[in-house]
Image: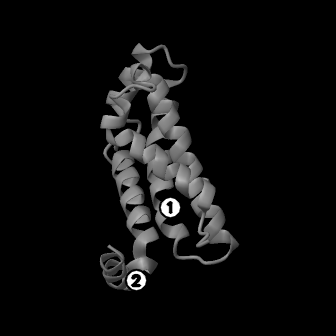
């Protein structure tokens, strides 16, 4: 067992530096594409849905969601290119934005999912969790 573990460690070691990028690129690309898919602004399908839910200023909220998704996705990716305070801040703020947007999605569109098996069978929980990971961790390697 120890021999297998050492072998796997030696195989994985050269790739350790890119592991945060696997998460960063997955989340950033996914979130950007979710927002981009809502273009042109304001996203009429989302506006209609917000109107039916009684949301005030549905045009503004729908536009903010789309722009927020794209901005958070780009911010997660770009934050990784800066190893200074700016990169850390950009990563954390973008991760926090992902969390806020996902909490809004859970509350508005998927309220029946809270702490049920359905929540854990969708990609939304992973988007939220990855956002939380970057909001907490930022660019820290420790």
Q: Residue 107 at x, y = what percent?
A: 49, 25
Tell me the SS state at disc 2.
Answer: helix
Q: Residue 122 at x, y = what percent?
A: 31, 37
> Mark 1 or mark 2, which has the lower sequence index?
2
Q: Is 43 drawn above or below residue 134 in the view shown?
A: above
Kindly report which numbered mark, 1 or 2, lies closer to the viewer in this rendering: 2
Check the image and tell me how it is coloured.
Answer: one colour
Tell me the SS state at disc 1.
Answer: helix
Residue drawn 66% across the image and 63% down it:
89
Q: Which quadrant does the C terminus fall into?
A: bottom right
- Which residue matches tag 2? 13
Q: Is 23 drawn above or below residue 67 in the view shown?
A: below
- Which residue matches tag 1? 76
Q: Residue 71 at x, y = what percent?
A: 49, 54
Residue 85 is labelled as none
Q: How dense is the environment of label 2, judged by Cα within 10 Å: few (below 14), some, or many (20 and up)?
A: few
């Amino acid at each position: 067992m120890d021999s297998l573990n050492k072998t796997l460690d030696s195989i994985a070691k050269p790739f350790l530096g890119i592991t945060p990028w696997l998460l960063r690129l997955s989340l950033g690309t996914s979130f950007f594409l979710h927002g981009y898919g809502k273009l042109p602004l304001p996203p009429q399908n989302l506006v209609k849905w917000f109107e039916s839910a009684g949301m005030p200023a549905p045009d503004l909220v729908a536009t903010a969601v789309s722009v927020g998704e794209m901005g958070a996705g780009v911010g997660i990716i770009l934050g990784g290119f800066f190893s200074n305070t700016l990169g850390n801040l950009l990563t954390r703020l973008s991760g926090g934005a992902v969390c806020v947007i996902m909490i809004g999605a859970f509350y508005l569109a998927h309220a029946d999912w809270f702490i049920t098996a359905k929540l854990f069978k969708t990609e939304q929980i992973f988007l939220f969790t990855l956002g939380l990971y970057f909001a907490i961790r930022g660019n820290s390697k420790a």
